[in-house]
Amino acid sequence: MFFLGTASGLPVQDRFSQTIVLELNGELHIIDPADAASSLLARARLDHRKIRSVVVSHMHADHHVGLIQVLKTAMHLGKQTSIQILFPSEGIEPLTTFLNACYLPIEWLGYPVDIHGITAEPHAVNEHLVFEAQLNKHLNPYRARAAGEPFSRAWRYQSYSFAITAKNRRFVYTGNLGKGLQEIAGLISEDSVLITEAAHLKVDDILAELETLQPCHTYLTHFHPSLRAAELQEAIVRRGLSERVTLAYDGLVCEFD
């Protein structure tokens, strides 16, 4: 697994906005391609032509805005094999409209692109990789705000967390949450690797919840600029979690059996 970018929607000098890549059987699976995703793939020497799937947790720009360039770069490099895109259904029409506006209709890319709206049913990319989505509460504040405005929107407030089964390994990815890890407690097991944000949640609350939920390992990422890695590490050590919690950084590569 490659943590190519680990910042929140506010990139900083030493962190690009979040982009994560899972490599499995020689294929690449991108989770939430942020603005620099295509360049970060190149920096990590990851071949765009090997991209098999892209998953987007919700429609905030820092979780998908790099997708267009990823598709374009793959085209220029001569990709021929297909890409599956798992996307919030409320964003599929705008995505295809924007591709057309960029002179990139899907038919011109030169390789098959299959866009699937995320549902409650598990989605198998292939026999080795399955995504199971669960709605979370990250976008609930927008629901309340929109209710008081004098116009309507087509928003469906779709923000997802995922349980990812990759061969015999289980990952849980939060994207963004609304209140805390308890929202996804049903996805977390003792053998799961948790990848969770540190942008909208209080780190002390995250660490306290980890003592209860006890995934086998946790990677904190999606860091807000106000967070200080040294202070976070001190809190992790103080709670006795240093063997079970890792602060991700741009360029971190993790290997799993």
Image (cartoon, helix red, strand yellow):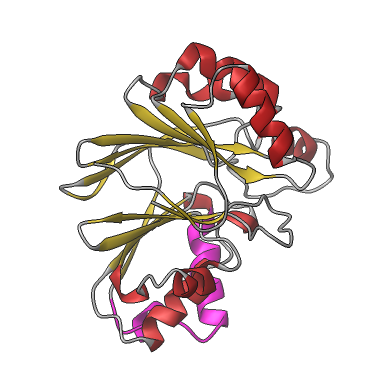
Residue sticking out furthest to the top: 212
Residue sticking out furthest to the left: 127
Q: From this view, report whether residue 39 is shown above or below residue 248.
A: below
Is residue 225 left or right of 246 when viewed as pictured?
A: right
- The residue nearer to you, when weighing 61 against 249, is 249
- The residue nearer to you, when weighing 145 against 178, is 178
Q: From this view, report whether residue 143 is shown above or below residue 11.
A: above
Magenta stretch: includes residue 110 = yes
- The residue nearer to you, when weighing 90 against 102, is 102
Q: From this view, report whether residue 163 is shown above or below residue 180.
A: below
The quadrant the C terminus occupies is top left
Whole-percent x, y for residue 108 in the image: 37, 86
Whole-percent x, y for residue 102 in the image: 56, 82
Residue at 29 percent of width and 43 percent of height: 256
Whole-percent x, y for residue 34 in the image: 57, 61
Please provide the residue range marked out in magenta: 91-111
Residue at 84 percent of width and 45 percent of height: 150
Is residue 207 left or right of 218 when viewed as pictured?
A: right
Magenta span main SS: helix
Residue 206 appears anywhere in the view: no
Magenta stretch: includes residue 235 = no
Whole-percent x, y for residue 173 in the image: 46, 38
